[in-house]
Image (cartoon, rainbow, N blue to C red):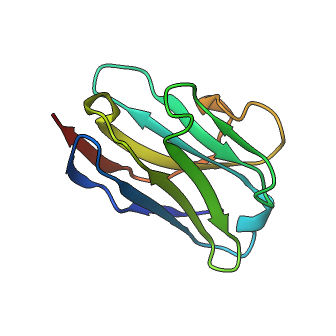
Amino acid sequence: QVQLVESGGGLVQTGESLRLSCAASGRTFSSYVMGWFRQIPGKERESVAAINWSGSSTYYADSVKGRFTISRDNAKNTLYLQMNSLKPEDTAIFYCAAKRGTTGWSIPSHYDYWGQGTQVTVSS
């Protein structure tokens, strides 16, 4: 069992930055692929980024490539998402998630555990 708690969301202006954190409970954090997803009310949850257990391999959605960076600190059981050059279209609730296995990094249904989400709002 893994419990995930996101933090770091907020209201920023276009072009500014935010760093999201996801604190995980349990001693098996390092064995999970971790992902960040976002969702706008009325729309499907979409993948933003994912990272393998060691941090040596990452995935990014095309919409965030070059602007967002996913990282993890297994010693601190924490996942991060550095978001730079934010745009109004990045406004959403951001969720972190954990999954076993090595496939389906961008597919929400492949993830086993989810946090409660943190709101990110980017004003124009």
The residue sitting at the top extreme is 43
| Residue 71 % position (x, y) | 63, 59
Task: State whether residue 107 is above or below residue 114.
Answer: above
The residue sitting at the left extreme is 124
Q: Quadrant of residue 77?
A: bottom right
The residue sitting at the bottom extreme is 75
Residue at 15% over, 34% down: 124
| Residue 109 % position (x, y) | 62, 30
Task: State whether residue 40 is above or below residue 112.
Answer: above
**Relative side of 38 to 109, left or right:** left
**Relative side of 60 to 21, left or right:** right
Residue at 64% over, 28% down: 107
Residue at 76% over, 66% down: 30
Quadrant that contains the N terminus: bottom right
| Residue 87 % position (x, y) | 30, 34
Residue at 81% over, 33% down: 103
Depth check: 32 or 49 in front? 49
Task: State whether residue 74 is above or below residue 57.
Answer: below
Count of numbered tags: 0
**Relative side of 9 to 99, left or right:** left
Task: State whether residue 7 is above or below residue 111.
Answer: below
| Residue 75 % position (x, y) | 70, 80
Q: Quadrant of residue 72?
A: bottom right
Depth check: 77 or 122 in front? 122
